[in-house]
Image: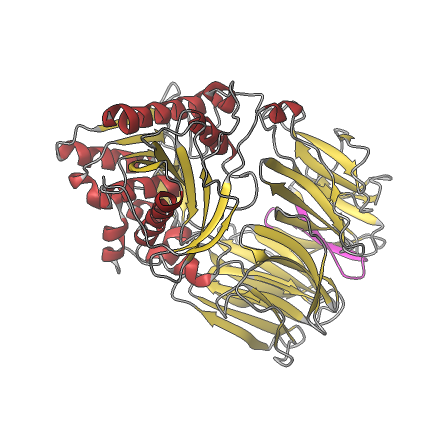
């Protein structure tokens, strides 16, 4: 493979060490340490819920840095952290006045005060009672029993059945109260198809049967006085709902199954007449749609990429007052109302790899910055009183911890957890170079991370490319990867073994606008490969010891697909590929996961050419480079069938330059630490063989 040279235009280059200075690395970091418990970076705390009074935050975590998690609690100040009592109720419904809670216990509905005291069984039946939803005035609540909806009183003891579905009809759930009417939801999956992911490790082979498809959504309104259920929408696709604070309006955010078309429809709850407030269509697929009525008015807020980037809009139920509130080439990652004129939002306006929190006054469109410390924030949760926001935050070589911001006191970011073991900092982790550059078309701006080898070889060092999974995901940002924390440590290990390691957020990734994500529509693999190649070209031009004539590529799931695709179509750029749980034939994924594949490639019977050119299987019989396939035998996301079909194609084409390992008890997300270790041990030795030994 020829060494790459590039005319790629540098846009932004932050922190790159072009002088190739020596750097200290963790001498004792081993593969077993990376993948075995206790985990070097610990386990990341995950927000669970607020207490009813909003003064305590509960989160899931392991203080022993293992996979066994417990529930912990901490105050708003970040103090008084301790393990939560075993009897903490995690799922409850807080009454509108904040004085009572409803929750399910042993199949019955329990009413208690907001401190979970004075508990009494308020509904008990032979069935399972769940999904309690308070009426706006707090006098009644609805719930579901055996798939049907009932209502009951809090002070006035009564119980009344609202729906009476047939046995073969889908169960109801309660979305909310609209005055004296209930908004109901049903998922009809009767047309799902059964598929099989066989399980072999037990005494007998099990079929692993599962039913898959896209549901038909049925949205209904039922007056509690008459109990007459009126269907207002039947739709195969995706629907989210909200009810205005007064109960006068119901909003439906409706997206079709291919995720190409969206409309927001608002119903007047008196006569159930409807009005379409907003419509959007795209050739790719819709993403990060969000809709919510203001807390005390009829104003509706929603997010849309209609202008090419995800921004905030508001509108009145009659269609008047339509207004866009944020503008520019950046994305609003999250937004929620704080009060009738203020919206809390997370934005990457500063940089695609940095997310800050703001509150936005929708009257004058002036934002107030709530946070300022550089870093990447995600997973936002708003307290019951809409004052506090809890979220996860990271920065370079600082794994995610939970933080809190009081929206009434900007710039006082409170760290709630300190979940990283002290031993983590005993390792001298290399800080990655975070770079921004422009691709071959002179227009597409790309993000890339670069890790440099501990020792630069005068003759150059080989390069390993990591490709993130999911497709629609961001993994190059100013922080420690949450989705790929094991891989991040593996990359540090590789630098100690003399490799450069890079990752490019290729087109299809999120956080970079609609066009960037949708460019891959109808041909997955093509533009992602080009972007990775442009990243290698940038590396060759700016890191003089990076030997881009020796490049290995690897990833899992979508990253595994990309590894096989890239080595199949571009053998002059990539010398070896390791593919974990990879899609090799998108038709297989369409039938078992149509919600993902239909928006990106269409129906395979209607558009077979989209699948043919996107499948690594298409290029397998002419494969020139060695590949390593690693797959869980009982993977029920990307079935083992994909690995089997790819291997069969290699065998039938006479290819002898491949390796394969399957893991009998692992699904798509591996659980066993020994299986993790075995995978990456094989990947490491595979690259050693083909990027070093084979190149001598």
Image coordinates for residue 64, horizontal then vertical, percent: 65, 22
Highlighted magenta segment, given as a residue range: 130-147
Please give left or right for residue 347 compared with residue 132 in the image: left
Image coordinates for residue 432, horizontal then vertical, percent: 51, 39
Tell me what residue is drawn at x 67 percent, y 25 percent.
Answer: 63
State which quarter of the image contains the C terminus. top left
293 up-or-down from 487: above or below: below
State which quarter of the image contains the N terminus. top left
Q: Is residue 451 in the magenta section?
A: no
Tell me what residue is drawn at x 37 percent, y 36 percent.
Answer: 545
Q: Write down the quadrant of residue 450 in the picture.
A: top left
Q: Write down the quadrant of residue 86 in the picture.
A: top right
Image coordinates for residue 658, horizontal then vertical, percent: 23, 29
Tell me what residue is drawn at x 27 percent, y 28 percent.
Answer: 690
Image coordinates for residue 323, horizontal then vertical, percent: 62, 76
Please give left or right for residue 1 compared with residue 317 in the image: left
Task: Give the dominant element type of the magenta stretch: helix, strand or loop.
Answer: strand
Residue 692 makes an appearance in the image = yes
Tell me what residue is drawn at x 31 percent, y 26 percent.
Answer: 686
Q: Is residue 132 in the magenta section?
A: yes
């Amino acid at each position: 493979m020829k060494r790459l040279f590039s005319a790629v235009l540098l846009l932004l280059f932050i922190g790159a060490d072009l002088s190739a200075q020596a750097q200290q690395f963790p001498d004792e970091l081993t593969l077993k340490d990376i993948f075995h418990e206790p985990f070097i970076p610990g386990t990341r705390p995950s927000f669970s819920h607020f207490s009813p009074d909003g003064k305590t935050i509960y989160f899931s975590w392991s203080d022993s840095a293992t996979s066994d998690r417990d529930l912990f609690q901490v105050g708003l100040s970040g103090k008084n952290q301790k393990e939560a009592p075993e009897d903490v109720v995690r799922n409850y419904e807080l009454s509108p006045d904040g004085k009572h809670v409803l929750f399910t216990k042993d199949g019955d509905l329990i009413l208690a005060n907001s401190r979970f005291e004075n508990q009494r069984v308020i509904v008990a039946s032979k069935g399972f009672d769940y999904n309690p939803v308070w009426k706006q005035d707090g006098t009644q609540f609805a719930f579901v029993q055996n798939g049907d909806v009932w209502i009951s009183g809090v002070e006035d003891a009564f119980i009344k059945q609202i729906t009476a579905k047939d046995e073969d009809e889908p169960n109801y759930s309660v979305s909310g109260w609209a005055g004296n009417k209930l908004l109901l939801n049903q998922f009809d999956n009767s047309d799902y198809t059964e598929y099989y992911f066989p399980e072999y490790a037990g005494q007998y082979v099990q079929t692993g049967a599962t039913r898959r498809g896209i549901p038909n959504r049925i949205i209904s309104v039922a007056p509690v006085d008459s109990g007459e259920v009126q269907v207002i929408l039947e739709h195969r696709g995706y629907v989210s709902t909200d009810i205005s604070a007064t109960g006068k309006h119901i909003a439906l955010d409706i997206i079709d199954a291919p995720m190409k078309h969206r409309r927001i429809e608002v119903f007047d709850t008196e006569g159930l007449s409807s009005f379409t407030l907003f419509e959007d269509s795209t050739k790719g697929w819709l993403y990060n749609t969000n809709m919510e009525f203001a807390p005390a008015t009829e104003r509706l807020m929603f997010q849309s990429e209609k202008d090419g980037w995800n921004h905030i809009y508001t509108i009145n139920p009659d269609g008047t007052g339509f207004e866009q509130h944020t503008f520019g080439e950046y994305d609003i990652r999250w937004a929620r109302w704080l009060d009738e004129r203020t919206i809390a939002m997370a934005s990457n306006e500063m940089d695609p790899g940095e997310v800050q929190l703001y509150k936005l006054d929708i009257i004058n469109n002036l934002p107030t910055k709530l946070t300022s410390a550089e870093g990447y924030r995600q997973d936002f949760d708003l307290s019951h009183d809409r004052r506090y926001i809890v979220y996860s935050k990271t920065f370079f070589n600082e794994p995610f911890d939970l933080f809190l911001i009081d929206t009434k006191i900007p710039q006082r970011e409170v760290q709630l957890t300190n979940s990283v073991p002290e031993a983590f900092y005993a390792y001298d982790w290399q800080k990655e170079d975070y770079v921004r550059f422009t691709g071959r078309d002179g227009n597409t701006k790309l993000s890339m991370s670069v890790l440099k080898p501990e020792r630069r070889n005068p003759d150059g060092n080989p390069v390993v490319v990591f490709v993130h999974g999911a497709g629609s995901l961001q993994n190059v940002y100013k922080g420690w990867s949450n989705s790929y924390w094991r891989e991040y440590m593996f990359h540090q290990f590789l630098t100690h073994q003399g490799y450069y390691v890079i990752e490019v957020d290729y087109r299809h990734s999120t956080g970079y606008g609609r066009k960037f994500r949708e460019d891959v529509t109808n041909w997955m693999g093509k533009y992602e490969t080009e972007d990775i190649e442009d990243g290698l070209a940038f590396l060759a031009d700016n890191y003089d010891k990076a030997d881009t004539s020796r490049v290995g590529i690897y990833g899992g799931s979508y990253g595994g697909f990309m590894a096989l695709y890239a080595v199949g179509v571009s053998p002059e750029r990539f010398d070896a590929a390791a593919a974990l749980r990879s899609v090799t034939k998108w038709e297989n994924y369409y039938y078992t996961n149509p919600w993902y594949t239909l928006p990106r490639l269409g129906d395979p019977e209607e558009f077979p050419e989209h699948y043919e050119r996107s499948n690594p299987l298409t290029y397998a019989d002419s494969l020139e480079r060695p590949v390593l396939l690693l797959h869980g035998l009982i993977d029920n996301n990307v079935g083992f069938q994909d690995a089997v079909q790819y291997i069969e194609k290699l065998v039938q084409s006479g290819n002898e330059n491949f390796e394969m390992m399957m893991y009998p008890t692992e699904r798509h997300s591996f659980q066993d630490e020994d299986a993790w270790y075995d995978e990456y041990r094989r990947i490491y030795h595979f690259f050693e063989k083909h990027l070093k030994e084979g190149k001598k």
